[in-house]
Amino acid sequence: MKLLSVIPMVLLFGIATMPTMGAESLAGGTAIETAEEFATLCVTPAEDLKADAHRGFCYGYLSGAHSVYQSIHGPRIRKAVCIPIPRPTRAQAAEGFVVWLKAHPQYVKESPIDALYRFAEQTWPCPKK
């Protein structure tokens, strides 16, 4: 097997398992396994002592998910997500995800990465060719 064909699989595995790696300290010892748990981190009230850590985790996860998506969908593969220019800020993307998840409660028990990709595909779909 060529190394280049393994890299996207390794990256995808890494981002898919990311919610349970190190998130225990953010959530008081509980792993972040669902979109609902992830969304809760993204909107931690500012007065909460862990707000900065929670938002940092949220924004980092969003950035990582986008990077993995970009690396898996190379220039020859039609993308389903076309984020507009100017790009939304991480805070806007996080808030958008939280609002979207409230409107789509059937996805709250999905993994964060699956729900994020659903959100992105529905929020920023690429034009049909």
Image: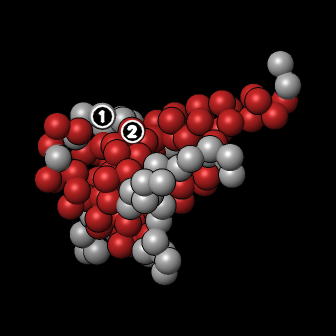
Q: Is residue 39 left or right of residue 81?
A: left
Residue 8 is situated, as x and y percent measured from the top left of the image, at 68, 36
User: Within 10 angstroms of label 1, few (less than 14), some, or many (20 or more) residues?
Assistant: some
Residue 25 is situated, as x and y percent measured from the top left of the image, at 44, 46
Res 7 seen here? yes
> Considering the numbered disc 2 on the image, is that residue within a helix, a strand or a loop?
helix
Quote the CA–CA distance across marks 1 and 2: 6 Å
State the residue in front, 35 or 29: 35
In the rendered image, which residue does mark 2 sit on?
114
| Residue drawn at x 24%, y 34% as measured from the top left | 109
In the rendered image, which residue does mark 1 sit on?
110
Question: Residue 49 appears in which quarter of the rendering?
Answer: bottom left
User: Within 10 angstroms of label 2, few (less than 14), some, or many (20 or more) residues?
Assistant: some
Three-letter code, disc 2: Asp
Determine whether 57 is above or below 23 in the image.
below
| Residue drawn at x 55%, y 41% as measured from the top left | 15
| Residue drawn at x 81%, y 34% as measured from the top left | 4
> Considering the numbered disc 1 on the image, is that residue within a helix, a strand or a loop?
loop
Image mark for residue 20: none
Instruction: State yes or no: discs 1 and 2 in contact (Cβ < 8 Å).
Output: yes
Residue 22 is situated, as x and y percent measured from the top left of the image, at 51, 43
Three-letter code, disc 1: Glu
